[in-house]
Image (tube, rainbow, N blue to C red):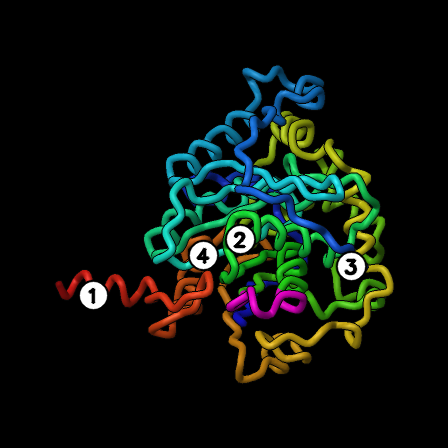
């Protein structure tokens, strides 16, 4: 496992980034799920930015946030990904961007986002470098982000992991690499614990999987209780979104106009507030380091470098905050690529395939 953290880690995730990869001002209970038979469906998605929340704020045709969302969607489509959905037997639906033409000779890589905007906002700057390196990318929206949702009450990381695994199996991917940022890293850790034969390697980016509920009161975070953390992670006022950005970046934008912040909140932060609040409670409530499951990809004691074992690596990216995937996407991609491609061969989808690195070397030699 690769554990990536920033030099000035502060345990909060910024909500957005620009499509070119540069920072901008917007800038565990187990439920058995039976997969539906047949191929993954190609759904007709509603444009979620057309919902009533978007209409309450700035007119849609003037909304900067709606425009940015469309730019990110175009970036995914132009990169050869298409939107798909998996409907599960319990009524949950997982939206995921998948390769339009999956290639069994490429390495499947699953990317899990954190709190903030949807997956396309958090991963679009990473698409081209990872695709050039030879990965087939799978980029889902976690439950209660975008159009992924579930009718049941389970808000645990285990349930998120189970639903994402169901989507991967429906897509025909049996073995894959996995990278998760912030909250997505919590889900990634659970996936590695629950599905060790499916998850090849794991990258955790700015993910405090070893945190405990008492750490808030102990002053290890910039907030002292869950209520304050929720107000920042789910901002409903411009000043809270402004605080989130400044906590997440080493170099936050000097100006954050309230009119744009309100527009972002109206479009991105008004849906599933209750459910997302419950997700945050599920992460912290009665959490104990001693309850952390053991996985092969990382040792049980994982408080940064002092407790990382031989089967894991620690990479520190300088001059970046918790939103290191937004401030330093190029550096993060370099670490991900190096970590997954450091061996000449990998096993994916039940077969041994050459790594993208070795493919590149063979083609240059020819």
Q: Which residue bears the numbered disc 1?
A: 362
Where 172 falls versus 66 (above or below)?
below
Point out the frontmost of discs 3 and 1. 3
Describe residue 265's horizontal placement relative to residue 224 as left or right. Answer: left
The reply to whether the C-beta atoms of the residues labelled 1 and 2 are less than 8 Å apart is no
Q: Secondary structure at mark 1?
A: helix
Q: Which of the pair 145/230 is nearer the observer?
A: 145
Q: Secondary structure at mark 2?
A: strand
User: Which residue of the protein is positioned furthest toward the bottom in this rendering?
Assistant: 310
Q: Locate the N terminus and report the quarter of the image it occupies.
A: bottom right
Q: Residue 65 appears at what percent x and percent y? A: 57, 28
> Label for residue 30?
3
Task: Tell me if residue 321 comes above or below residue 310 in the rendering.
Answer: above
Quadrant for residue 240, please give it. Answer: top right
The residue positioned 48% from the left and 33% from the top of the image is 73
The Cα–Cα distance between marks 1 and 2, rounded to whole angstroms, is 27 Å
**Cα distance between the residues tagged 3 and 1:** 45 Å
Pointer 3 or 4: first along the chain:
3
Q: Residues within 10 Å of mark 2 (few under 14, many from 20)?
A: many
Q: Are marks 4 and 1 in contact (CB under 8 Å)?
A: no
Q: Which residue is mark 2?
A: 111
| C-alpha gap between disc 4 and disc 1 | 20 Å
Of the numbered discs 3 and 2, the one sitting upstream in the chain is 3
Residue ID for mark 4: 108
Left or right? Give the position of 85 relative to 159: left
Query: Horizontal and vertical percent for residue 343?
Result: 37, 74
Does residue 268 belong to the magenta stretch?
no
**Nearest the eye: 161 or 182:** 161
Bounds of the magenta segment? 192-202
Relative image position of residue 34 (x, y in whole percent): 69, 50
Q: Nearer the viewer, residue 335 or 91?
A: 91
């Amino acid at each position: 496992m690769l554990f990536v953290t920033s030099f000035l880690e502060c345990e909060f995730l910024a909500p957005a980034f620009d499509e070119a990869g540069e920072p901008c001002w917007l800038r565990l209970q187990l439920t058995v799920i039976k997969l539906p038979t047949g191929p993954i469906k190609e759904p007709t998605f509603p444009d979620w930015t057309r919902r009533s929340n978007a209409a309450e704020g700035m007119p849609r045709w003037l909304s900067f946030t709606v425009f940015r969302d469309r730019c990110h969607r175009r970036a995914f489509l132009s990169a050869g990904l298409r939107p798909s959905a998996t409907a599960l037997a319990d009524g949950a639906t997982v939206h995921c961007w998948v390769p339009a033409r999956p290639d069994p000779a490429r390495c499947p890589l699953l990317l899990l986002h954190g709190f903030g905007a949807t997956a396309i906002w958090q991963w679009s700057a990473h698409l081209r470098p990872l695709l050039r390196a030879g990965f087939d990318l799978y980029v889902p929206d976690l439950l209660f982000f975008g159009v992924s949702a579930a009718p049941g009450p389970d808000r645990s990381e285990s349930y998120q992991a189970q639903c994402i695994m169901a989507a991967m199996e429906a897509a025909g991917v049996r073995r894959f690499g996995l990278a998760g940022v912030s909250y997505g890293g919590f889900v990634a850790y659970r996936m590695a614990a629950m599905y060790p034969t499916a998850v090849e390697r794991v990258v955790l980016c700015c993910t405090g999987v070893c945190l405990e509920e008492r750490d808030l009161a102990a002053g290890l975070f910039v907030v002292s209780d869950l209520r304050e953390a929720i107000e920042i992670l789910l901002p409903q006022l411009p000043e809270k979104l402004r605080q989130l950005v400044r906590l997440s970046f080493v170099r936050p934008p000097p100006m954050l106009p309230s009119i744009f912040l309100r527009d972002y909140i109206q479009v991105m932060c008004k849906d599933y507030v209750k459910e997302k609040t419950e997700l945050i409670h599920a992460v912290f409530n009665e959490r104990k380091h001693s309850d952390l499951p053991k996985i092969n990809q990382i040792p049980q004691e994982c408080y940064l470098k002092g407790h990382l074992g031989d089967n894991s690596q620690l990479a520190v990216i300088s001059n970046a905050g918790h939103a290191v995937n937004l401030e330093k996407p190029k550096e993060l991609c370099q670490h991900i690529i190096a970590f997954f491609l450091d061996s000449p061969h990998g096993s994916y989808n039940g077969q041994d395939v050459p790594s993208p690195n070795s493919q590149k070397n063979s083609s240059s030699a020819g």
